Image (spheres, grey):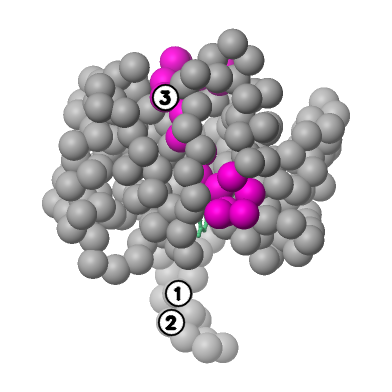
Amino acid sequence: PRRAIIVVAAGSGTRLAAGAPKAFVGLGAHTILRHALDGVFHAPEAQVVVVAPADRVGEAETDARLAAGDRSDLVTVVAGGATRQQSVAAGLAALWGDVEVVLVHDAARALTPPEVFARVFAAVDETGWGIVPVLPVIDTIKRVDGPHITGGVDRAELAAAQTPQGFRRDILTQAYALADRDHTDDAAVVAQAGHQVGVVDGDAASFKITTPEDLARAEHLLRGAPG
Ligand code: C5P
């Protein structure tokens, strides 16, 4: 296919402290990874590259096959690296030759609605830019230095970045080859390489499961109760 979705699931999940790498922690009847992939397989058709911890590749293959159903020929599972950026690079190396547009998605954003993937693909196709789904910032944000507030930031100028973030494959590959330090998202890698990055609407359900409270919120949403 022309499209690919890289799902990074190689993090350790230290802050979740659930005794397994985060993507393999249970959420309802399945793992966090399986829920994330259920969303991915309801998105527009794409090669799906799952990046798993080296010792969980087999488990990730099982989850991916179950989520993919009759589309399991689209799945590739590879081992990740020590940082998110290294894990994305491992995913990029596994892309098929015909792929032109790539989305990079955190497995930890397990409940991301399929429409968000479609929205990001459409915006990349339309603009050729890197595209980031964002939400407005709700809190008032302060700049701090130790115990002191040193300034404020106008929150109208801010947005909270989510995934899936989408890019033209040639731009993302080139930006990763140039990256000389670690960034926390792919948009930062692409912006540092001098490319334009734009936004589309994110979704509250795309929150990243990081803490035990986040996991409880995801469980709650899965049971159909308001978040
Ligand atoms: O740690 P954090 O929640 O910010 O990680 C975001 C996503 O990146 C998660 O889905 C995690 O599994 C993934 N990740 C990875 N390889 C790493 C670190 C994080 O694939 N070394």
Q: CA distance from mark 3 to mark 2?
A: 47 Å
Query: Label 2 amino acid?
Result: Thr
Residue 47 sits in which quadrant? Answer: top left
Query: Magenta segment range?
Result: 41-57
Query: Comparing marks 3 and 2, which lies closer to the viewer?
Result: 3
| Residue 141 location (% of width, % of height) | 50, 64
Q: Which mark is residue 47?
A: 3
Q: Secondary structure at mark 2?
A: strand
Q: Is residue 24 left or right of residue 7?
A: right
Please tell me whether mark 3 or mark 1 is closer to you in this view.
3
**In terms of sequence position, does the residue under pointer 3 or pointer 1 come before the other?**
3
Mark 2 sits on what residue?
A: 150
Distance, label 1 to label 2, CA atoms, is 6 Å
Residue 77's place in the image compared with 18, above or below, is above
Location of the C terminus (image quadrant): top right
The type of residue carrying mark 3 is Gln
Above/below status of 12 relative to 23? below
* Element assignment for label 1: strand
Relative to 207, residue 182 above or below: below
Q: Residue at x 38, y 49 (%)?
A: 90
The image shows residue 77 at horizontal and vertical percentages of 51, 38
User: In the image, is 126 to the left or to the right of 131?
Assistant: left
**Residue drawn at x 78%, y 61% as measured from the top left:** 19
Could you classify mark 2 by the number of other residues whose Cα lies within 10 Å: few (under 14), some (14-19), or many (20 or more)? Answer: few
**Residue at point 18%, 58% (across, down):** 178
Identity, as a three-letter code, of the amino acid under mark 1: Arg
Front residue of this view, candidates 57 and 119: 57
Q: Upstream in the sequence, badge 1 or badge 2?
A: 1
Label 1–label 2 contact, CB within 8 A: yes
Q: Which residue sits at x=49%, y=50%?
A: 79
Q: Which residue is mark 1?
A: 143
